[in-house]
Amino acid sequence: MALVSALLLVNAACRPAPAAAIPWRPSYPLAFEEAREQGRPLLLYFQAGWCGICRDVEVRALTNPEVAAAAAAAVPVKIDIDQEPRIAERFGVDAIPAWIIVPPDGAAPARLGGRVEARDLLEFIRQAAGASDPVP
């Protein structure tokens, strides 16, 4: 069983991620400024190119149309921890994948990490970003 799980992780890591349904912003500073100007929460997704679990979550959860719609309530930015280690450190990210939603009112950020299903991510985004329509 462990061998099957390991092979699935390797397979997921080797597959290219599908086109994301979420319009990720290209940089943290630009996303931060956009969120501040629009009074919207900032949705940070911490990942890395070598992370098999990240690729799996991208295939299974981030391409879900409901997740993408909920993410539209925030300003989403994808952060590669290898390319942006200071941002990961700033937010205390020590494991990936990780999601952090920074509310526009300066309240404490909400956090979610690890392998998640679309439903879990959808609920997290809706609750933390203040979107309506609870998950059925």
Image (cartoon, rainbow, N blue to C red):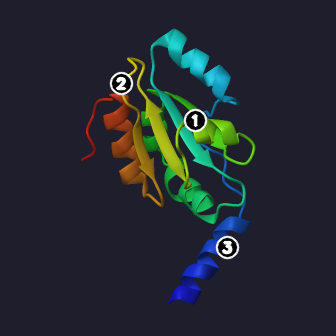
3 or 1: tag closer to the N-terminus = 3
- For residue 1, side relative to residue 125 (left or right): right
Q: CA distance from mark 3 to mark 1?
A: 32 Å
Q: Position of residue 35 (x, y in %)?
A: 52, 18
Quadrant assignment, res 88? top right
Looking at the image, is mark 2 or mark 3 earlier in the sequence?
3
Q: Where residue 107 is drawn, which disc sits there?
A: 2
* Residue at image point 61% right, 73% down: 9
Q: Indicate the amino acid at tag 2.
A: Ala
Residue 90 marker:
1
Query: Can residue 74 be spotted in the picture?
Result: yes
Q: Amino acid at mark 1?
A: Arg
Spot occupied by residue 117 in the image (x, y as percentages of width and height): 42, 58
Which labelled disc corresponds to residue 31?
A: none
Q: Nearer the viewer, mark 1 or mark 2?
A: 1
Q: Answer above or below: position of 12 versus 119.
A: below
Does 3 appear above or below 40?
A: below
Q: Nearer the viewer, mark 3 or mark 1?
A: 1
Residue on which the image places disc 3: 11
Q: Secondary structure at mark 1?
A: helix
Under tag 3, what secondary structure?
A: helix
